Image (cartoon, helix red, strand yellow):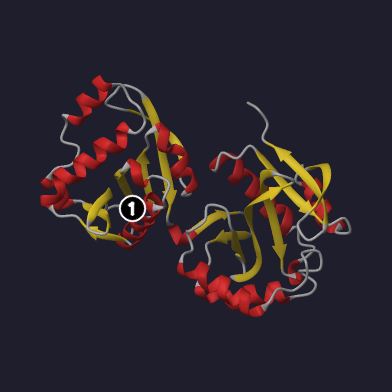
Amino acid sequence: MLQIVRSLPADAQTLKEIAILSKGYWGYPENLMSQWAGSPIITPASIAVADVYHALVDTSAVAWYRLWTGSKTAILDDLWVLPAFIGQGVGRSLFLHAVSQARTSGALSIELDSDPHAQPFYERMGCYKIGETLSSWQRLIPRMKYDLSSGQILETERLLLRVQQAADVPALIDLWLNPQVTRYLGGPRDKAHLQSDFDSVTRRPFAERYDLWPLVEKETGRLVGHCGLLQKDVAGSSEIELIYILDPAVWGRGYATEIGQALIKYAFDRLGIKRLIALIEPDNQASERVAAKLGLLFEKEVVRPGGALRRVYVLEKAAK
């Protein structure tokens, strides 16, 4: 069982050893690793003044992070995981713990210098590249940022897409029970399953990199949709689907196109995605019109699990 605890100055040597083994996982030259291992990395004095936490499996430390707070931008200086525990969710748990600590401190964002090998991990966590930093090894490494303000995913002129809150659940359930909304989505869902699923998301709103998020109309503060990106297997290929689901009360206002454009930019520029699709029921002409406005082009038809026919519309990021 994983447990995250605050580190003590006496833990410094153990945490340093974890960092050395973790960095060595990427196969760096021995001379550079020896040079780095001879540096302080983490000291008792640093642990005493920074937010340093480590993850325990049983009673053994397997990972740790160091976070500096006290300003509107928190700095994540370190996040190291023993090689045997990479890919098991330990890094994700530590990062989300750091997010919680930063948010509690009043910070609006987290910034960090990422090892190039770790950049995909931080992107999965929702970070995005904002520049480059010259490291002690005289190489440029990614400078990354994670936005904390109100759990906001993105904002447009009229709309706000943000992480789910407990107060959103009744409106989201109503949305997915609406026959008009779900006409081309397989019909209304089971209410008990919706309640269970949304309660789970409320408890862990940052658990997934790809998800559907509540769409809020800024003028009224009302929840008017459920939009986002989902990873799906389509005819044997892993795809990222662009999804825009809106309350019928706001149909015809151009909201689907507005949030769709913003999500495309978010996917391409922030998440580094190269290709997006939309799976559209053949009779759903309104959704096809939105896809066309967004620049998606018809590629093929596929049969989904259960036998439903869907048209695949595609948009690929233009090469620079």
Residue type at tag 1 = Lys
Q: Position of residue 118 (x, y in %)?
A: 41, 38
> From where the camera sits, is residue 128 visible?
no
In the image, 95 versus 245, the foreground residue is: 95
Residue located 57% across and 55% down the image: 155
Image check: 30 left or right of 269? left
Percent x, y for residue 111?
37, 44
Residue 9, given in percent of the width and then of the height, sits at 12, 51
Which residue is label 1 attached to? 72
Q: Secondary structure at mark 1?
A: loop
Q: Residues within 10 Å of mark 1 (few under 14, many from 20)?
A: some
Residue shown at 42% from the left, 40% from the top: 144
Residue found 44% across the figure and 44% down from its top: 122
- The number of discs equals 1
* Residue 214 sits in quarter: bottom right
- The C terminus lies in which quarter of the figure? top right
Q: Between residues 101 and 203, which one lies in front from this camera angle? A: 203
Horizontal side of residue 173 vs 54, given as left or right: right
Does residue 304 appear in this view? Answer: yes
Q: Position of residue 56 (x, y in %)?
A: 26, 56
Which residue lies at the image location 57% right of the left edge and 39% below the top edge? 269
Q: Quadrant of the N terminus?
A: bottom left
